[in-house]
Image (cartoon, helix red, strand yellow):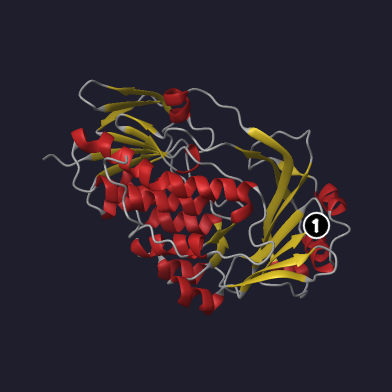
């Protein structure tokens, strides 16, 4: 049996996690990313215990513990009084319960860690896919805007909510704009001038909220992300800039801790919050979607990247020992294994009630993608 070759479209969290998992499984893999370089974008990320179990399999746990913040809890508080709704305890308690830590980090640091788990010669920048074609022999050809082309036994498309591959396979779909927008930024904690904030708090208002937490172990960087109504704004881009003054006015009725953080932040990004229904199918032949390309979700459970990272582990298990002729069945098995969980998280996140009151989170954080039972081929 010749060694399987897999092309991964997209070098984000899901793409790099997939490459790391496939490389770990001894499968030939190459990643094709449209950007000309990787950048440390200003955003935080919550790395749940379920995602940390996958990262541990890549040997990245020490690196993440050294670069991320280890919070006492995710505290849910009333927007004005600060009264506690539900304090979800993390730290050593959650680590003992779920078998891995819950960390708060910078997206750029997690992305760099994942990139370090993939040999650099397997990552090809400045490769924007412009064509995909499956031949009768099950081989898949990718063509790129730079004039190059490659052929692989299988293609995994982790190219995000605006997935080129998804559109080619299933047609263009329009996102459901929620009528809400989000502001977010990371800034030096020194700008707080010694003011102390909680480890991680979600402040729940009547029609809006803000989540604030540290992203470095020495508390040197602070991150926040909001959600509030603004029906007329439909820019689905993480790089659009927002107006700090407008943001401060939108939260001027919130607790002094919130106002202090917003007063200190120098600039913010702004984007429209969108939602999509679970994708009916994830693949065709020897091509499959992964991560946001097939199950994008609102950020309210902080599980979007975690679901893509879990996908990567399960996909590698499904492809292990498979040749080109077995890829299609392996991809169906991957979809059948993952879709019930990712759909549940998608639909749960949509409600924006996660941890708002006392919640049993075991089904999310206790999950272990390396040992999740795989669907039978009959079910696939």
Q: Which residue is located at x 23 percent, y 48 percent?
A: 320
Name the quadrant of the N terminus: top left
Q: Which residue is located at x 46 percent, y 50 percent?
A: 341
Residue situated in front as seen by the camera: 80 or 108: 80
- In the rendered image, residue 288, in percent from the top left (x then y), is placed at 37, 35
The picture quadrant where one finds residue 176 is top right
Residue situated in front as seen by the camera: 262 or 82: 82
- In the rendered image, residue 50, in percent from the top left (x then y), is placed at 46, 62
| Secondary structure of residue under mark 1 | loop
> Which residue lies under the disc numbered 1?
205
Figure check: 220 above or below 337: below
Viewer can see residue 164:
yes
Residue situated in front as seen by the camera: 184 or 168: 168
Task: Please tell me how crowded label 1 is: few (under 14), some (14-19), or many (20+) other residues with Cα within 10 Å.
Answer: some
Viewer can see residue 13:
no
- In the rendered image, residue 300, in percent from the top left (x then y), is placed at 63, 52
């Amino acid at each position: 049996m010749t060694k399987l070759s897999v092309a991964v479209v997209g070098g984000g969290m899901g793409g790099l996690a997939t490459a790391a998992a496939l490389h770990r499984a001894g499968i030939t893999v190459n990643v094709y990313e449209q950007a000309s370089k990787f950048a440390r974008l200003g955003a935080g990320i919550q790395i749940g215990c379920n995602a940390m179990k996958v990262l541990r399999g890549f040997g990245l746990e020490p690196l993440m513990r050294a670069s991320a913040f280890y919070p006492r809890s995710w505290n849910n508080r009333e927007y004005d009084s600060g009264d506690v709704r539900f304090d979800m305890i993390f730290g050593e308690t959650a680590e003992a319960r779920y078998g891995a830590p819950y960390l708060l980090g910078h997206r750029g640091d997690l992305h760099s860690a994942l990139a370090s788990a993939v040999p650099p010669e397997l990552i090809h920048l400045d490769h924007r896919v412009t064509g995909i074609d499956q031949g009768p022999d099950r081989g898949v050809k990718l063509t790129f805007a730079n004039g190059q082309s490659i052929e692989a036994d299988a293609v995994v498309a982790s190219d995000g909510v605006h997935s080129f591959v998804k559109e080619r396979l299933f047609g263009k779909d329009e996102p459901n704009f929620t009528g809400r927008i989000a502001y977010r930024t990371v800034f030096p904690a020194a700008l707080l001038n010694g003011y102390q904030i909680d480890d991680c708090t979600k402040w729940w208002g009547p029609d809006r909220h803000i989540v604030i937490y540290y992203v470095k172990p020495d508390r040197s960087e602070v991150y926040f992300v909001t959600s509030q109504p603004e029906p007329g704004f439909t820019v689905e881009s993480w790089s659009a800039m927002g107006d700090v003054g407008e943001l401060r006015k939108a939260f001027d009725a919130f607790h002094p801790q919130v106002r202090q953080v917003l007063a200190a932040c120098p600039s913010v990004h702004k984007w429209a919050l969108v939602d999509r229904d679970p994708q009916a199918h994830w693949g065709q032949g020897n091509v499959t979607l992964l991560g946001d390309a097939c199950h994008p979700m609102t950020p309210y459970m902080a599980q979007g990247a975690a679901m893509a990272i879990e996908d990567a582990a399960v996909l590698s298990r499904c492809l292990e020992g498979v040749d080109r002729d077995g890829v299609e069945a392996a991809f169906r098995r991957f979809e059948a294994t993952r879709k019930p969980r990712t759909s549940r998280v998608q639909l749960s996140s949509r409600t924006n009630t996660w941890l708002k009151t006392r919640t049993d989170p075991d089904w999310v954080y206790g999950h272990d993608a390396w040992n999740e039972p795989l669907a039978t081929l009959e079910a696939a």
